[in-house]
Structures are given as structure tokens and as C-alpha cells.
Image (spheres, grey):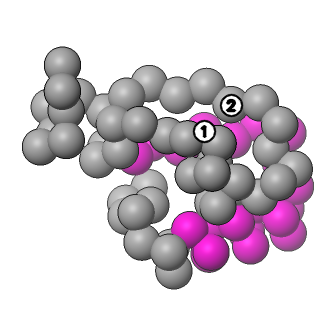
Amino acid sequence: MRGLNDRGRRDIVRKVMHSIKPKIICLQETKLTLISDFDVFSFLGRDCHKFVYLSARGTFLDNG
């Protein structure tokens, strides 16, 4: 993924995920160091009940 901070891109991803209803989703976003429940719901929809993520490292937002 590129640009999940952009609302338009989040909307597109959410619509695609809603239409194909995958069991497992793997996304790579290199600029987000923190992903909240709100973030996940905004680009995957409310049907996504469980998620795991690793923080981005080496970006200007990286604190570690």
C-alpha cells in the first residue's frame, strides 16, 4: 500500500475488501508507525475483528 493516510485511498481499499470478502489480508504500509482500531476500520471496514501490525521503522514518524 502507499498512502493509507489519504482518506480517498482508504475508501478504495475498504470498498475492494468489502466486495471480495477475503479471510486473510496482508498489507504493507511503510509510513504508519501506529495503527489504531479506527484506522483499521477506516480501510478494512467493521467486519475486520482481529488485526496485527508491526510499526514502520526508519520513517520521520519513527520514535524508536
Distance of mark 1 from mark 2, alpha carbons? 10 Å
Amino acid type at circle 2 is Phe
Q: Nearer the viewer, mark 1 or mark 2?
A: 2
Q: Residue at x 56, y 68 (%)?
A: 10
Judge by depth and name the residue closer to the eye, 34 or 29.
34
Which of the image's four quarters has the N terminus? bottom left
Residue 32, image x and y in percent?
Answer: 35, 44
Mark 1 lies on residue: 26
Residue 30, image x and y in percent?
Answer: 31, 43
- The vertical placement of 63 against 20, above or below, is above
Relative side of 46 to 29, left or right = right
Q: Are marks 1 and 2 in contact (CB under 8 Å)?
A: no
Total number of numbered discs in the rendering:
2
How packed mark 1 is, by other alpha carbons closer than 10 Å (few <14, some 14-19, many 20 or more), is few
What's the mark number on residue 4?
A: none
Amino acid type at circle 1 is Cys
Magenta residues, start to end: 10-29
Q: Helix, strand, or loop for circle 2?
A: loop
Mark 2 lies on residue: 51
Q: Quadrant of residue 55?
A: top left
Which of the image's four quarters has the C terminus? top left
- The vertical placement of 8 against 61, above or below, is below
Judge by depth and name the residue closer to the eye, 43 or 20.
43
Residue 33, image x and y in percent?
Answer: 34, 36
Q: Residue at x 77, y 30 (%)?
A: 50
Q: Helix, strand, or loop for circle 1?
A: loop
Relative side of 59 to 34, left or right = left
Q: Quadrant of residue 58?
A: top left
- The vertical placement of 36 against 8, above or below, is above
